[in-house]
Image: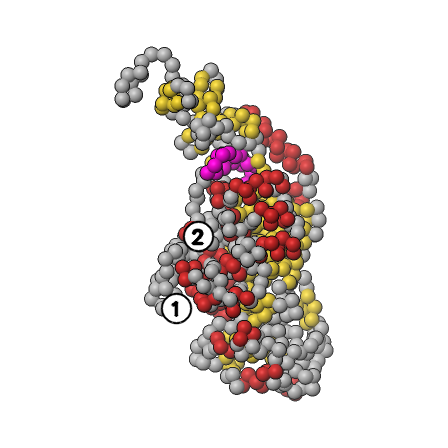
Amino acid sequence: MRTTALFLRGRFFLASRVALAKAALLFATLCAALLFAAPAYAEEASSDDKVHIMTLEGSDAIIIESNGVFGMVDSGEDDDYPDGSDPRYPLRPGITQGHGHQDEVVAYMRSIGVTEDNFDFYIGTHPHSDHIGSADEVIRAFHPKRVYVPEYKDEYISYDPALWDNRYVYDRMIEAAYEVGATVIWGLDPSAPAFPEMPDADLGGNSELEGDGSGNVEDDGSGSSDGLGGSNGSGEVDDPSDSDNIGQAGQDSVDLNSFAEDEADGEGAAEAYALGDPNGSWAGRLIEDGPEPQHDPVTLDEAAGLDFQRNDIAAASDMPGGPVGTIGNPRFMLGDFSIEIMNYGDDYKTTPVADANWFSWGVKVSAYGKAAFLAGDIGNYDGDEDRLAVQLGHVDVLKMGHHGLSTSSTPEYLSALAPDYAMWTSDYATLPSDRLDVLNELGTRVWNSASSALAGCDAVVFSFGASGVVAEGPDEAVVEERDESPFWTAYQCGAKTPLSGWVAAGDSWLWFDGSSHAVENSWVSYRGSWYYVGEDALMRTGWVSDGSAWYLMDSSGRMMSGGWVNDGTGWY
């Protein structure tokens, strides 16, 4: 979804008339009921296991936190865009110019404790600027160990108007990942290593690799680990042309992810992954025991002398100078959270699709028997949501696909997932009524980024614990507008809530009579005077017809009676 196609069609207002004692009593009663219905709220709200969905306008930025370690799924728009001076990056119609969120995203991440030392991964669900536009800024600021993104070329898109600045934001993301030494993972395979940047080749010693639960792998110092895909175990190196990976997507491939120095020299293991060298060679980036990577350029011919790891490939047709990624496992851990990238595949590379949304990844985050699904821009164009509905089943938290637009979140899909909480990253009116009806029937608590941001909330935070999932968002009661009846609905803590009395709506007023929906097309008797609210629920001033007669309302909405009035057109 392009941010330029999103705008705030609805209006959002805080229920602000404090003189309404009855409404205040209802609010207090509701919050008290919620508190006592969930006695673990205060404890769970301080959980170390959280999913932060930032409240950006038409952009996705989600931080996953567990035990002081962080990962990220998308980071939203930035201010950069191609100016057309580079023929690879035309300034196409529809490209978002400005409207970036990179500063607020980086600031929020720092405010919750993200640093270069604890930022484990960045996942870009697909190459659209409202999802990965700020990826380069985030990657340079926090140096993730791994960067995941579906491989992208413009030829994968069959509909030219949907090319936008896809390649521009994708290339900048990959460039930033190379700069900070992150492993770029653009392909997924359940048989691949979970952490391909970590040494996991058997080089003749006896080291044992152990996970520490944070996404890191530790060596116990004994010098051995399991399995070397490119060695026959006798010290001889297999011919890379025999690799099972040759010919992926019709391309010759050579595995450069991991190699060993000469075993006879006693130097032990060294990890490498391929980088594009603008001078025409491939560079194997060695990760020694020291904190800084060392570089050892190798030509394609020289690459035959390296040991290889079978699951991690680099496409030769992209070199020299082009981006090179590797293959990783779609499942891995972040502290207490199990992370699973879903809806991946390579068919779009051989059969182009109309839009990058068609190959958007989704991310399932699970702990304590509870799950969140972060749906990127997944839709049901070719049955993706139908398949995911079966694979996922019930989830506790759903970040709805494609900003809540009608291209995603079919009613059947929502019914199958039956989320306890749902959030979409646009305004309330964006979500189609049939989707909202399903969520209401399910009793799902809902948030949208526009109203949450206007309420002063930087992110809606979902805390996971043994007692369940607790949402932390705006506390104020809000009224939301749609383009059809019921036009105005009151919410508090993500749930519809009844109000009573007058509630401000911009320069007009709404009347609630104990319902969560504002009264429409009706007379209102209030403190001895009559008022009229129209079919859109807004209070009327001036001449009003109720279908049987005309009435004149003063500037406060009160019906006038008795005497003569000149309204500028005559006397009445």
Q: Which mark is residue 3?
A: 2
Q: Which residue is mark 1?
A: 88
For mark 1, give the secondary structure: loop
Q: Amino acid at mark 2?
A: Thr
Name the image quarter holding residue 262.
bottom right
Q: Position of residue 392 (x, y in %)?
A: 65, 54
Task: Work out whether residue 561 or residue 260 is closer to the camera in this orientation and state it.
Answer: 561
Q: Eyeballing the image, is 524 above or below 88?
A: above
Residue 296 in view (yes/no) = yes
Give the mark nearest the N terminus, 2 or 1. Answer: 2
Task: Work out whether residue 220 or residue 554 is closer to the camera in this orientation and state it.
Answer: 554
Cα distance in 3D space between marks 2 and 1: 22 Å
Magenta stretch, residue numbers: 474-492
Task: Work out whether residue 15 or residue 350 is closer to the camera in this orientation and state it.
Answer: 350
Residue 486 shown in magenta: yes
Q: Eyeballing the image, is 518 above or below 426?
A: above
Residue 419 in view (yes/no) = no
Residue at x-position 61% and y-position 34%: 31
